[in-house]
Every structure is written in structure tokens, then in C-alpha cells.
Image (cartoon, grey):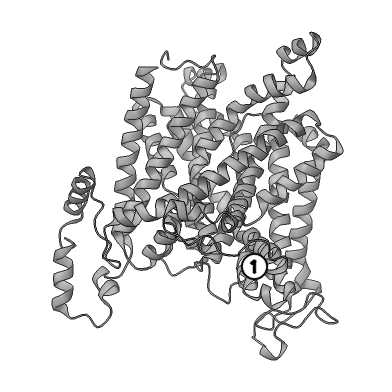
Amino acid sequence: MTGYLLRRGGQALVVVIGLMIVTFIMIHLIPGSVARSVLGVRATPGRIAIFNSTYGLNEPLYRQFLTYLDQVAHGDFGTSYALQEPVSTLIAQRLPRDLVLVGLSTVLALVIALPLGIYQAAHRDRLDDHLLTGVSFTLYSMPDFFFGILLIAIFSVQLHVFPPEAPSATSLGGILADPRALVLPVVTLALVTMASYSRYMRSSAIEVLAQDYIRVARAKGLPERLILSRHVLRNSLLPVVTMVGLSFPNVIAGAVIAEEVFNYPGMGLLMYQASTSHDFPILLGCTLIIGVATVAGSLAADIAYAVLDPRVRYGRT
Amino acid sequence: MAVPEFARSRAGQAGLGLVVAIATFSFLGPLFYHTNQVTVQLALATLPPGPGHPLGTDASGYDVVGRLMLGGQSSLELGLAVAAATAIVGTLYGAIAGYLGGFIDAVMMRVVDTFLAIPSLVFLLIMVNLFTPNVPAIIALLTMLSWLATSRLVRGEVLTLRTREYVQAARVMGGGSPWIVYRHLVPNAVGVIVVNATFTIADAILTYAALSFLGLGLPPPHADWGTMLSNGLNYLFDGYWWVVYPPAVMLILTVVGFNLIGDAVRDSLDVRLRRR
């Protein structure tokens, strides 16, 4: 297990460095002068020269990259060109909001998807299974921005139950103090993710139900409720765990949309604005954080897999 | 074996029916239902559904039904183009990595991991700045996002295939690597590739819709469901429901249709596939 972890950790490190190189190159491909877009079209050549030398933009690309690596190694993500604030401060302000949004919606998605998938598997090919399959296919196929706006139209405009905007507080406590405002963004993201999780859970539970140990459990007279909650749930969780770890980038993409729809200033909106204003340090910092989280997510999924399934033993390959 | 299995799946039939109906509507519809989709007519803007305009007109005075047909053509073409490009690039990359194995495989797969770690929307946000949006560029961008999953699947498939006896027999008979990859490995991995391509069509249509919602889609003369939907949403609260729900319904039905087909084909091949 230790050897496996070391190897996977090494791979993860390579991927993170590769990620930084790719993002760095990609960002510098964006046409147009950074200085002009930050300082405006009327900037004098003198000020442009000062800007370029302040941020080291005259250096060759590989020097800029090495400088950046050195900064990051010291915990410094640079300063935003447009906002003139340290990127780490900006991310620290925004990250908690995304953690709340992504965390709550993932938990909600799982809380709905796991029982739903098992229920559908137990009622396989009956009318209610088909209906629920229809619902989850529709949710999965729904563009998330449309779903979010639809919820606003129903619950905010028509019924006045929930506010159409996400909480605007900056602190974690402030966000959680206004739970009603969180409902719509969380539900939007949760239901769209729930749809793919529950499909997975259903097919996984169907496979488990066909196993011999389920027949044994039934033969020894275990109530169906216990069979489903003890044997089926635990054994069919495995593929879903991997799925949750790997679906992280998709959830982030959904979060960008949810932030835009509900005007929730998280990292997604920060990156969106940075991409249109040539704010390289923000783009680099955010991609790095999300990339690391993605890599960590798939690593965590592998480890959780081993913990949940005693048959999986890594390291002896 | 796979075909009768697919024919028995009711979900697969429903999906196929949906897709055929939508394709017929989009491509053959304009032959029978003639509308002006070229000149903006503000005098006819946002007319409610009624005689002459079964689903009303949009903010530029275009007939919504006619627009849905036109938009369907580009949405379906976009999806198919991305799926085809994804299948080709992903298959070649995955097959080569899986077949060569060892160090080259490890390097090639770390490259895939790296690109997978870049959040897709961030990637698109950055890349869209590089081009004035046009159809080939959008197809290329969406392909760059989706070939990764395909290449992983194909690699996994090739890894198990290359140890089979018939592949070893081909090698003993003097078949070179390109020949073995092309003649034996790719045809046997074709099930995985087809299933993945079907899901790619659906995902490409959805991702493009998200892009146009973020204002990064194709500029006006171009019509597709994603653009229609995100433009239409501006008028939802004015009560112009007919510019919002019809493109949304078409989009959702199409994506559902392709997903149903993909699921049914996968079940009929009984291959264990991971779906992103």
C-alpha cells in the first residue's frame, strides 16, 4: 500500500507540474498586450514599459515560468494585474463559497442518488423504475443554466419562496447564515449531478443483486430491507465512489454556471472575469488550485476504493 | 450478436426514434416549411404563437419553428463533427499508447491526466479568447476536451486485447505494429469507441449550449439550439415563453435520445465502460 501510494503520489506531482506548464503556455497564447488591456488604450509607452518590467513580462517565457514556480513554492501566487490584490487573498475570499456550494450539492446529490439507485434496482423494469429513469435522463440532459433559471422562474418569481440570488456575504458564517438563499444554487447543481450518480448506482446495484451472497442472504431469511441496506448498499457503492472522485472537474464546470446564474461570486466568476481581462496570475492560481483538487479527488477515490473493498489490495502488481 | 440485442432494448429504440425524428425535422423540415431566416424583421418581433407562426417569432422576427429546424442542423452537425473527431484522435492516441506500453505509454497517459486535470470550462474560457469564434474552432475546442476520455477507454481495451492469442499470432506471422493496431486492435475496440462517440455527441451539444450562455458562442447569423435558448432566456421574464421552451425541449430531447442509444448499445455489447 505504501509503495502504491508513493507511486501514485509521484504521478500526481508530475501531473500538477504538467498542468502548470500547459496552463502557462495556454494563457500566454492569448493574443493582445497584457499591459494595454490592463492600463487601457491610452496608456503611454513609458507606463507600458514600467508595467512590463514590474511583472517580468519582458523576460523569456521559460524564465517567467521558473520565476512563477519559485513564487508558488514559497506560497505566493502573485498579484492580480487588474484588481491589484494578492491572488492568494482573492482565492481565500472565494474558495469557501465554492466549498460550500460544491460540498453541499455533492452531499445532497449522494443522499438522493444512493437510495434512489437502489430503489430503482430493486424495482427494476417496473413502471416506477422507468419513470424515475426518465426523470434522471431528463435532468442529466438539461443544460444547467436553463435548469437554474427555470428554478428561479418557478420558486422566486412565481412562488416567492426562495430569493433568486445566492448569499453575497464574504465570510463562511455569513453565507451559512442565509440558508434560504443557498437553496436554489445548491439544488440546481445537486440535481444535475444526482442524475448521473443515480444511473451509476442503479446499474451497480443491479449487478450486486445478481450475486450469490445476496441469494444466500435471502435464503437465510434476512428481510429485504436489511439486504438492501447492508449488502447491496455497501457493495454497489464502489463504482460510485470512483465516479464521485472523477466527476470533480464536471462539478466545477457546473459551479461556474451556477455562479453566473445566481450571481454568486466564487472562483468561477473570478476566472471568467480574469479570462476576459488578461489577468494571468488569477487564471494560473485558480487553475492550479482546481487542478490539484482534481488530482487529489481521483487519488482519494482510489484510496477510498481500497478501504471500502477488502478485495482490492494495491502494491502487489 | 449486438444488433438483435440492441433491437430488443426498448430504451434504445426510443432513443433511436427520437434522434431520427429530430434529424428529419431539422434537415427535411425546411423543404416543406418555408420561412424567412435571413433578414431581421423587427415589425414581426416576438409575436405570440398563432396562425402563420405556430410557435411565434423571436426577438429578430424569425419564425421559431423555422429557426428550430435551422438550429437543429447546426447543433446536430456540431455534435457529430466533435464525436467523429474525438473518435479518430482518441482511438489513435489510446491504441498507440496501449499497444506500445511501457515508458511511452506512461508518458502519453500522464499527458492525458494533465489535460483531464484542467477544468473544462476554464480551458474553454481561455481558449475561446484565442479565436474569433467560428465553427471549426469550436469543433476543435470541444474535441480537445473529449478525446481524453476516449483515449483512456481505448487504451484500456487495447491493453487487454494485445495479449490475446490472435494478436500474438498476427505478430508471429510477421505483422508490423501499425498493421496490428489498424487491423486487429482498433476493429475489436470499436464497440467502446461507438458507445463513447454517442455520448460525446450529447455532451458536445450541452457544452456548446453552456458556452453560448457564457456569451462565448458563435455570433448572430449562426443559429443553433444553445444560442437560441440562451438568447431566449433574456425574454423569459417578459412572458415570451415560446422563445425559451421550444429550443430547450429540442435540446433536451436530442441529448436524451443520444444517451438512450449509447446506454442501449453499451448494454448490448456488455462492455464495462466508464462514463464521464
Who is closer to the viewer here, B256 or A125?
A: A125
The residue closer to the viewer here, A223 or A37, is: A223
In the rendered image, which residue does mark 1 sit on? B229
Task: Name the spot of residue B39 as percent of width and height, x first.
Answer: 64, 85
In the rendered image, the quadrant that contains the N terminus of chain B is top right
Find residue B144 and report its horizontal and vertical position in percent: 46, 50
Q: Is residue A94 visible in the rendered structure shown here?
A: yes
Instruction: Identify the image quadrant of residue B266.
Output: top right
Q: Quadrant of residue A115?
A: top right
Q: Position of residue A179 (x, y in %)?
A: 57, 54
Residue nearest the observer in this picture, A20 or A129: A129
Q: Residue at position x 26%, y 58% from top?
A: A86
Q: Is residue B231 left or right of residue A103?
A: right
Residue B132 falls left or right of residue B158: left
Q: Mark 1: which amino acid?
A: Leu
- Residue B70 point in image, percent of width and height: 68, 70
> In the picture provided, is B184 more to the left or to the right than A75?
right
Q: Is residue A219 above or below residue B247?
A: above
Residue at 45% x, 31% y is A300
A52 relative to A120, above or below: below
Chain of residue at mark 1:
B
